[in-house]
Every structure is written in C-alpha cells, then in structure tokens.
C-alpha cells in the first residue's frame, strides 16, 4: 500500500526559507488546502500545480508516495 506524503514540500519550503503560512500569504494556495497538506490528505492536481508554479519547482519537490 502507498501512503501520500508532502515531506518533499516541507523540505522545499525550508530550502527556500519559507514557512507553511507563506503559501497562503503569497496567494499560492488557500488555507483549506494548507490544512489538507499538513494532514497528508489528498489535494487536487490543481493545488499541486499551483504549488509547483508558485514555488518554481517540479512535482517531485512537492509530493511523494511512501510504501507502508
């Protein structure tokens, strides 16, 4: 079974000197989307795309699937 993880996103934010809330402040995603991300819940591909575009990164730097 695979488990969704946004660990790459948190590392990417850290590498850019940003905090979770900066995603909302910069208008990249909504607060509802951030709450889902923080709980490792599924978000739409649109949100993943917004993160990639807003941060200038690839999808691999936002999301991964881990075997459990």
Image (cartoon, helix red, strand yellow):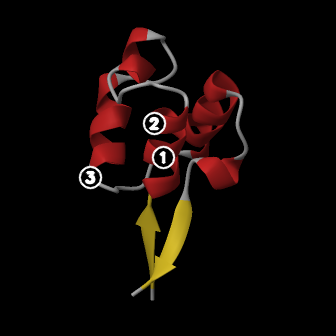
User: What residue is at 48 percent from the left and 34 percent from the top?
Assistant: 13
Residue 28, given in percent of the width and then of the height, sits at: 52, 20
Real-space CA distance between mark 2 and mark 1, rounded to the nearest whole angstrom:
5 Å
Measure the alpha-carbon separation of dots 3 and 1. Answer: 16 Å
Marks 3, 1: nearer the viewer: 1
Q: Which residue is disc 2 drawn over?
A: 14
Q: Could you tell me which secondary element the residue under label 2 belongs to? A: helix
Tell me where residue 48 appears, x and y as whole percent: 58, 41
Q: Are discs 2 and 1 less than 8 Å apart at CB? A: yes
The image shows residue 41, relative to residue 68, as above or below, that is above
Total marks shown come to: 3
Mark 3–mark 2 Cα distance, whole angstroms, equals: 18 Å
- The mark nearer the N terminus, 3 or 1, is 1
Vertical placement of residue 3 versus 24, above or below: below
Q: Secondary structure at mark 1?
A: helix
Residue with the mark numbered 3: 39
* Element marked by disc 3: loop
Q: Quadrant of residue 60?
A: bottom right
**What is the crowding at mark 3: few (fewer than 14 residues within 10 Å), some, or many (at least 20)?**
few
Q: Which numbered disc flags the more N-terminal residue, 3 or 2?
A: 2
Q: Position of residue 36 (x, y in %)?
A: 31, 45
Q: Is label 3 in contact with label 2 (beta carbons under 8 Å)?
A: no
Query: What residue is pinned by disc 1?
Result: 11
Residue at left 36%, top 45%? 37
């Amino acid at each position: 079974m695979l488990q969704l993880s946004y660990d790459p996103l948190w590392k990417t934010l850290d590498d850019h000197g940003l905090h979770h809330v900066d995603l909302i402040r910069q208008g990249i995603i909504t607060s509802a989307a951030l709450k889902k991300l923080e709980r490792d819940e599924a978000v739409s591909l649109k949100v993943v795309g917004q993160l990639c575009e807003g941060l200038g990164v690839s999808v691999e730097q936002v999301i991964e699937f881990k075997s459990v």
